[in-house]
Amino acid sequence: MDQFAVPPVVPADPTASIPGLLAARVATSGDGVFIERKETPDGPWLPVTARAFDALATAVAKGLVARGVEPGQSVGIMSRTRFEWTVLDFATWLAGAVPVPLYETSSAEQVHWILSDADVRLLVVETAHHDEVVGQVRDQLPDLGDVLVLEDGAIDALVASGADVPDEEIARRRTLAQAADAATIIYTSGTTGRPKGVVLTHGNFVDLSLNAVAKLGAQVCPPGSRTLLFMPLAHVFARFIEVLVVPAGAILGHTPDTKNLVADLGTFRPTFILSVPRVFEKVYNSAEQKAAAGGKRGIFQRAAKTAIVYSRALDTPQGPSLWLRLQHKVADVLVLHKLRALLGGQAAWAISGGAPLGERLGHFYRGMGLTILEGYGLTETTAPTNVNVPGAVKIGTVGPPLPGTTIRIAEDGEILVKGVQVFRAYRGNETATADAVRDGWFHTGDLGSLDEDGCLRITGRKKEIIVTAGGKNVAPAVLEDRLRGHPLVSQVVVVGDAKPFIGAIVTLDAEALPGWLATHDLPEMDVAAAAEHPRVRAALDRAVERTNRAVSRAESIRKYTVLTTDFTVENDYLTPSLKVRRDRVLKDFAAEIEGIYSGVPQGTAV
């Protein structure tokens, strides 16, 4: 099958806007809780009704107006995920303006590019440090007005500024935007080249949200359901969820510091969770290490295996046998219920996106009692194009298209998208827009296939396809995702373009290393020592062997090298959305890659 279309459930409304969604929530359940927030990290969750939130966002919108923000102009937000970000987003929309997110880890050069390219007129940052970063390029931004700091009371300052702005002005402005108008400009992560500003419209968000709620709402996010945002709100996935919860009638929470994530999950108790695969990997690996430290590694591994086998059996016509159901119940009593408790104890569903989850983790979590609905999307598609749906989950795929979406597989395997969520344009870049959207189809750059039910399977990234010296085409994602699932491994970059065989660069997880060493009766050592230790190497060899079972001999990793430095956002080898900047890695570690092929002793699984 090379094309699959799902018609919209909710017809498009050319007058629709995000402020309209909020107004409808206030009208139907204004006194119901919309957000729960913490005023201090250790404080209680305090309810904020939809009406109270609307009033606060209106007061902040008045402050934006008082400080000179005009309809259609850009307002920048540079912060971690927190309650105030959502207030600023909606306040900007109520003022008729366009919020532009910046990652809180952005460099001065990145800040300058985004603020200048988006023509940002007012900027709100979180900390004094962010203010200092902006200060490094402030003299190059003549059109930038106020820069306000959240930790210095930016919200209160805006409310005070707008005290004399009449209610009628915000009432007028909140109705200005139509479906075709820009709602936000989100800059791509920029794994290669300068980030492009993706212009997403009010219609993109509204039509996609309403259709997603119609498809998933009854089971995943019915009214009163709860979700805790801990992904960066500068990322399109979190931004989409921030809008989605409005028509869903769901309750939203925020966690600025992921160090508090487990504690916040325990007290907020979400009913559905949104994350990227790396978080699910870390939860699994941490649980295994904790069990091993307590002398219960064998029990954990048996329980995990039972969960996986049980989940796989759910996909068979006969279902799990009576014996397997009994084994699963024992595994639940001993291990699995404790993992659900770590996630708050109420979550039955999770949505994963941003990268492939992998079948092993998908089956483990479903067997544990948390069904992960893996999805797919890009910044240019307002996040999701596809997602698995309750009752028809196909682990290993990203599910069928959402209503209002058509997926086509081109002759070369590239995934093409047409639908309500496809972006309007790259800001100020007609050439890039014309290259990305041809004949009405957005060319994603990803490779995939469709099954008979319209479920999409992602097989790789078009630009990342490796062609070995023998002419074999290899998609690195399959190998990288599987190998990265090992508790010792942090990041993997598969190499081998124009080389005689496939190799890999591996980095170690410094956080997981001490626990792994302890459970394997090895002394403490740093990453550099571990990278050379024979038992660590042997464990990595076994991990590579298991990874290679997913591919043919010609596609398998024949040699690998272990770096003593990890790839992080701080050293700029990862994008803020945790994608490896492959081009930079290949350039900066060219000598290590050549070492794989020049006879320098390296790790090997063959």
Image (cartoon, grey):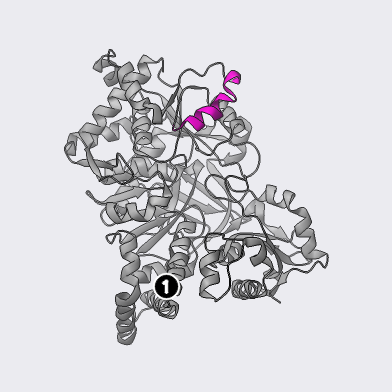
> Against 329, is 122 above or below?
above
Where is mark 1, residue-wise? Answer: 291
> What main secondary structure does the magenta stretch of the protein show?
helix
Q: Disc 1 residue type?
A: Ala
**In front of the other: 217 or 532:** 532
Q: Residue 522 occupies which quadrant of the picture?
A: bottom right
User: Helix, strand or loop at disc 1?
Assistant: helix
Residue 220 rendering spot, x and y as whole percentages: 30, 55
User: Was residue 189 drawn as part of the magenta stretch in this picture?
Assistant: no
Q: Is residue 400 left or right of residue 50?
A: right
Question: In the orientation shown, which residue stands out farthest toward the top?
Answer: 164
**In front of the other: 526 or 478:** 526
Q: Is residue 367 left or right of residue 131?
A: left
> Against 171, is 371 above or below?
below
Q: Residue 486 occupies which quadrant of the picture?
A: bottom right
Q: Is residue 521 left or right of residue 193?
A: left
Q: Which residues are magenta?
A: 126-140
**In front of the other: 205 or 276:** 276
Label 1: few (<14), some or many (≥20) within 10 Å?
Answer: some
Question: Can residue 392 be seen here?
Answer: yes
User: In the image, what residue occupies the spot 73% across and 53% down?
Assistant: 589
